[in-house]
Every structure is written in C-alpha cells, then in structure tokens.
Amino acid sequence: MIDLLTLSIVILSLSSLFLPLFQLARRPSRNWPGYILAAVLAVVLLLVGTYSLSPQRSVWFGSLLAADQLGALFALVTLGVTLFVTVASFDTVKGVNNPVYYSLLSFTALGMLLLSFSQDLLMLFVAWELMSLPTYVLAGFDKNARSNEAAVKYAIIGAMSSAIILYAISIAYGLTGSTLISTVVKGFVAQPNLLTGIAVLLFIAGFGFKMSIVPFHMWIPDAYEGAPTTISTLLAAGTKKAGFIAAIRVLLAVSTLYIITQNSLFTIANVFAVLALITMTLGNVAALTQKSMTRLLAYSSIAQAGYILIGFVPFAYNPQSMAATVGMTGALVQIVTHAIMKGVAFLAAALVIFELKRGDMGAFSGLSKRMPITAFTLSISFLALAGVPPLAGFWGKLLLFLSVANSQFGWLAVAGILNSALSIGYYGLVIKRMYMDEPESNQRVHEPFWYIVIFAVAVGLIVGIGIFPQPLINFASGAVPAIFPK
Amino acid sequence: MSFVLSLLIFLPIIGSPLVYLVTRLNKKWGVSFSAAFATLILVVSAYVFWEVFSNTPAIGQYALVENYSWVNFQFFGLNYLLGTDGLSSPLILVSALLTLLVVIGSRKLIDHHEPEYYALLFLFEGAIMGVFTSLNLILFYIFWEVVLVPMFFFIGVWGGPRRKYAAMKFIVFTFVGSTIMLLGFLYVYFGMHFSSFNITDLSGSIPAGLQYLPLLASFVGFGVKLPVVPFHTWLPDAHVEAPAPISVLLAGVLLKMGGYGFLRVSLGLFPIAASQYAWAFMIVGIVSMFYGAVVALLAKDMKRMIAFTSINHMGFVLFGAFATVVSGNLLGIQGAIFQMFTHALAIGCLFMLSGYIHHQAGTREIPLLKGMRLTMPRTAAILVLASAAAMGLPPFASFLAEFLVISSGISAYAISGISILVPVITAAYFLWMIKRVVLSAPEGSSSVHDMSRSDVLAFAVYLVPLVLLLVFSYVILTPSQPVAQYLWSLAKAT
C-alpha cells in the first residue's frame, strides 16, 4: 500500500521538474502543460484514494513520513483543490509562461502531499517551504502592481512565519534532542517548563499565519485580493488546510499528553478557545463591510478558520472525551467541506473578475441574468458556507457547535451560533445582489466549459455531502485516532 | 413500514425540477401541470389526514411512522424518523390545500420568472411537509431551514417596491431565531451524553435542569416564526412586500411552523420548565393578541391590516397551548390546533383577496378604496364573508377556535378573561374597514373589473370548509385530543 503513496510522490516530482521543459518548445502549444498536470493530479488523487480505502498506518522514508488516514484526508483535500485550480486555469492562464505556472502548481501540490504525511519536524518544515515558495511566485503572476504588492507582502509574512516555525523547531530539538514529532511531544510532556510553553506558542503563531488565525491574519485580505483569483483559491482552500494539518500533527499531539496544564488558566484548550472566538468574530464582522468580493471571501475564510478551531478546543481539553471525538470529526469535516465550498466560491468570483474585469460588488449586481450558472453556483456555495442545511457546510458546523454545546466552553457554542447567524447577513446580501438587483447591462457573458464542469462537480459534492454525509463523517471520525502520537 | 410521509415530502421536492422544465417549455402547461401536481399532493395529504382520523394513534404515539438510520459514527446517531398525529395532520392537510389554491391564484398575479416561481413553490411545500412530520430534532431543523430559502426568493424576486429590504430582514430574523433554536437542541443532546435526537426518545426523559435554557432557545426560534411580539417586526414588511399568493403561504403555512414548534417541542420536550413558566408565555400571547389587534386598527394598507391580524390570531395559539399545561383544560391545546387550521384558511382568503383587489383597483389603501359594493359587488361580498371568518363570526369555525382558547385561558387564570376583548377589537377593525371600503359611496366613475364566476368559486374553497368545520369540528378535535392529553400528562408529571 505504501507504494501507492511513494508512486504519487514520484509522479508529482517528475511533473514539477519536467513541465517547464514545455517552455523550450518553439511554438508553445496552448494548454498542454495544464492538461498534463490535471492528468497527473487525477492519477495521484486516484492513488491516494485507493490507499485511503484501507488505510493502514505505516512508516516510510526512515520515519520522516507516515501514512495514515488523517494524512490521506488532507492529501485528498489539498490535491483535489489543486486539481480544481488547474482545471480552472485552462481558460484564464494563457501566454508564454504557462508551463512555469503549472510547474509551480505542481510543486505546491507536492509540498502539500508531503506535509500531509510528515512525522518529523524537519520534514514538515521542508514540505512547508516546498508548498509555500511556489505560491509566493504564483501570487505575483499577474504582471501588475497590485499582484506584485500582494506577492511581496505574502512572501515577507510567509518568510516570517517560516522563521518562527524554525525557531520553535530549534527549541524543540534543544529540549528533546529529536525532531521526530512523537519524541518531541513525549519530551515536552515529560518536562513541561517555560521553554516548552514558548515553543508551543511559537508553533501556534507560525502555523497560525497559514491557518489565518486572527492576530496573524492581516496579510490575508490583501494577498487574496491582489493575487490572481485562481491562486487565491489555492491559498484559501489548499495551503490554508496544510496549516491545519501541521497544527493538528504537532499541537494537538502535544495536547493529547499535556494534561498537566488542565487546571491552570493558560492551557492549550483555553488558547484555542480564545483564538477561535476572536478569529470567527473578527472575520464575520469585517466581512459585513467589504466592498470587494475577494476581500469578502478572504474575511469569510478567516471566520471559517475560527469555526474549525472550535473543534480543537474539546480535544485539547480532554482528548479522550466524547466531545473531543465529535469536535475533531467536526473540524475535519469542516476542513473538507470548506475546501469545496470556499474553493468553488473563489473560482466563481475568479470567473466573474476575469470576464467582467472588475471585482467590486457592483460586478455581481444582477449576475443571475448575465452568468446564471455562476450565480447559481455562488449562491449554493454561499448558503453552504452560512451553514444552511441540507448543504455540506451544515454538518461540520453541527458537530463543531455540538462539541462545546453544554460544557465549560458553552460560550464558544453561543458565539459560534451568533457568528453563524451574523454571516447570513453578508452571504444573503450577495445573493440578493445577484438575484434581486438589476444588472448594468443585460448582455449574457460567456461561461467557459471547464468552469461549468468544476461548478457542476462542486455543486454536486456540496448537495451530495449535505444529504448523505455518512461516508465523509465516517472517514473523518476514522482519522481522529491518528492524532494520538505513536 | 409505511412510506406515505416520505412520499409527501419528496413528491414535491422531486416534482420541483419537473415543474421548472414544463413551465419553461410552456407557461400555460406549467400552471396546469403545477395545479395537477398540487392536487396529487393534496390527495396524499388527505389520505394522511384520514388515516390519523380513522386510526387515531394512542396517547404519545404516532401514525405512519418511518424510521431509518441516517448518520452514525461511534456514539453519535441521527435517525430519519417521521410520524404524524392529531397535531400535524391538520397542518399537513391545510398546507397542501393552500399550496393548490396558491398555484391557482398565482396564474394572474405572477407575471415574470414563472418557471422558478412554481419550482420554488413545490420545494417550499416539500420542506413544510418535512417540518410537520419530522420526529428527529436535527431532521426537523434541516427542513425548518430549507423553508427559508424559497421564501427569501419569493419575497425578494416577486415582491413589491421594498422587496429586497423585506427579504433581507426576513432571512436575518428567521435565521438568527432558528440557529438559536438549534443551539438549544445541541445543548440537550450534549447534556444527555449524546443519547438521541429523536423526539420520541427525548419526550418525558429530559431532566428538569436541562430544560430551562433550551426552552428559552426554542421560544426565540418559534417566537420569531409565530411571531410573538418582541420578534414580530419582520412580518409586516414581509407580508406587505410579498406577492399576494406568497402572503397566503407566509400567513397560512409558515407561521404555523411556529405554533407547531411550540406544541411539539417546547411543550413536548421541556414540559417541566414550560409549565413552570407558562404564565410568561401566556402573557406574551396576550400581549401579541392585543398588540396585533390594536395596530391592525390603525393600519391604512389593507394587507398590513391583515398581516397584523395574523399576529393577533397567532397569539391565541401560544396562549391556548400554555393555558392547558397550567389548568389541565385540554381545550386550550385543541383550540390552538383548531385555530391554526381555521386561521390558515381565513387569512389565506383575505390575503388572496387583497392581491386581487390590488390587481384590479390598483391600490390597497383602505381610505382610497371606496364603494366596492357598487363597483365590485362580487369582490365585496367575498371580502365581507372573509372578514366575518377572520373576526370569528359564528357561521365560521374561527369562532369555535377562539372560544375554546379563551375558555381554557379562563380556567387557568381568571384574569385571562380580558382576552375576550381581543375578538371585540378584531371585529371593530374589520367592520370599520368594511364600512370604509364596501359601504361608502363610490368616487367618480371608476370602471373596475369585478371577479369572474370562476374566481368566486376559487375563493369559496377557502370559506366553505370553514363553515363545514363548525358543524364537523370533531374531524380536528377528536384526533387532537390524545395530543393534548399527552402534553398535559407530561406537564402534570412534575
């Protein structure tokens, strides 16, 4: 079974390295690199999917990587998002540089794949960089000032977060003499002291930049707005999830053993709870006032990160409890469904921005008359993001709020519910704009074939998971035991 | 296991895209197809009603139960559990009947985006059936939320001048209310160590300490829908802006979700807390009754007046339901169920009529409509009859409903006798409206088209059952008795 995953890594490495060769062709044929990458990603998804049918835990590459259900879940999500982004780029990314574009996408996918299975802090860091570095370039891929500004901002913040993670790793190595996550975790728990606390906080900060947790979120709206919107999709639905797997692998593993701190105020659970509260509240409140679609999506993405963090709280508090299982299952379900919902919302916005050459809210007025399929997809994904049942977004939220509903973190459930109610304000406003306002012109706008394919698949998934959530919930709850360090 | 209730839910939902396609092909066919389809659903719901009437389930039992495992992992479980009893079967019947009447009534009043309109109409109907038949709290919540989406579009796309504002206000109010209600459900489930979401399992087994906060949460959720006074402000806007057929659904069907929720969930699951604080709910009910009546008295827009009549009449439902758990006088709950049925028909008729008058006369302002007895004699006759039905004049069954509720209220607290003033105010504003609109002298030589004979027939469908129900009231009161008995036994057990 492990061979399937090794094969995936090899295939993705090859595609990353050889796609730029298309640049040498005398007459660069338009979309071949894109088609090849899409095929490669589809094959890799198939391989990882085959593995995840019967996920046996096993270690390979000298315990740098370990295959388990948790890793498979994240690999499927992040690779799936990359596939969506690749397909969406067929129509919008043209020009001489497109082999490089697809090669960078491929590198990012490879980084996310490795990150999903990392069991060692150094491997995790290398995968983290492999995932991040190409996205700095991709964010600046549009040759205009805004895109470049976004790329620079993103690169600087990214470098800072990498440095913070590296610093935390160095503390961890200094304290425990190992970079293997399970050894580090056991070392931390054996001798909790000020330095371990600092290392944990540094990890939270470092991963928090990618996860878009609130005090580390300020780059998100600018980067998402300035970057090509297809790349914003990758950042919001793909690399952000990679931040979550890193946090789960390192931080929640610590909390499975770190029960000593339960009695004091400054516990990991309390830190997560406060971060969840401010993240979702700030995200939702800021989203209410946005005038640009990508910024709205960026803030809503921050808010969703807050919801996901709710699930970490009962787990960090007492990993053996029923609430912890419910919470982590909810967090994993939400991570999967959020990738689909937010991914397709960003791609729909990308299409509108590409076709109408503007991204402010005015572009979306009366969109149902101009681009009916896009407007419909956007509405479904927004309703799902707001948590309206029976769409996919409902189940994650249900489990997340349930996991803290009647405990000492009950206030978090109240805050989550109120935030959820608040979010219908801005999601509803966009739907109102698209279906009830008058468009500036009644001219139909072309909706490219590949986008329609993506929209159909995504809407099918959103509705399908909403009505039959059992397979996804089973898979997510089966991945929870993998969090406990072996 | 029976499958009738699933049929009732999924027939409309699956029919919705079919209706869309047919209407897109040809609008005339679409309306006829929709009407035929709605008739089919009405037949199924009539079967459900008949089944409950002829084999009334015993106290605390449900008829036509369906139970499948739906979502499970480890200790977490959700069932697809459906069932009906004397509480839900009248609401199922009246919802199906109103949907059919709305399809017929929309023919003239809806003139753009017809395919989407009729498709959403059936999505709405399916979700409503789901709300009234679900016996699992999460399933109930899901259908509850699905109802919002078509209604949001109905108001926002087909509504009047301030439709967008009204649609946003509607969705924000109801969504906030229902998410708070969901939080209450989660609180109970977590507190009971993830035992079950089934109403059948939870009823009577929730410890008292777990009942107070969820009761409050359910009060917010159902109170917004009913609506009761502090949460009612979305309703006048929604009603005034919604197209007339949608107002019929809004008042006739959507508000009943609130009343149903109070009976099924607030009283059924949290009886200890509910009977302890019944006086508070009764006060809220009385305040809603008086408030609705007094504001209706001042309204100039006919539709706004009818909208406030709804708040007034729905106050009776809340009042009657909670009067029973204080006094043990079952007539309160039975009257509440009866009131929901009669109000749906009477108010539906009035709203459709207001849409008709607006369409023909170009205005709904009461001071501007004059001399209708001469200009539109048939319309005027129907208006007088429908008003009589709404104010509870004896040939119409609304009289019985209000009588039952008030008598039960008096047996709970004698002071509730003041509620007898509410029908008086109601009669006053209806009569005043009739005086100004029907009996006044016509202005100028306005040539207004009266309704055709076939339209009169459509309106008779609302009113004839109301007269018959006064005679054959047992078709609703008999099946509702075990329900009232059960809810009272839960409250009494404290």
Image: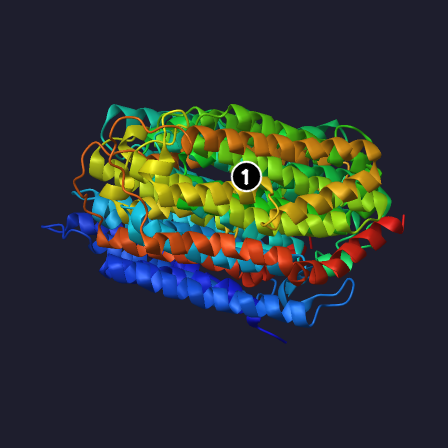
Q: Is residue B165 left or right of residue A477?
A: left
Chain letter of the residue beneath label 1 in the structure image: B
Q: Where is residue B419 in the image (x, y as percent from the top left)?
A: 71, 33
Q: Is residue A103 visible?
A: no
Number of disc labels = 1
- Is B453 in front, or is B29? B453
Crowd rating for badge 1 (residues with CA inside 10 Å; few <14, some 14–19, many 20+): many
Place of residue B77 in the rendered image (x, y in percent of width and height, measured from the top left): 68, 60
State the residue at coordinates (36%, 29%).
B370
Quarter of the picture containing the C terminus of chain A is bottom right
Residue situated furthest left in the rendering: A27
B456 shown above or below B406: below
Residue B6 position by quadrant: bottom right
Q: Where is residue B139 in the image (x, y as percent from the top left)?
A: 60, 56
Could you tell whether B350 is left or right of A453 in the image? right
Q: Give the camera-side residue of A242 and A471.
A: A471
Look at mark 1 in the image and give the residue it sits on: B175
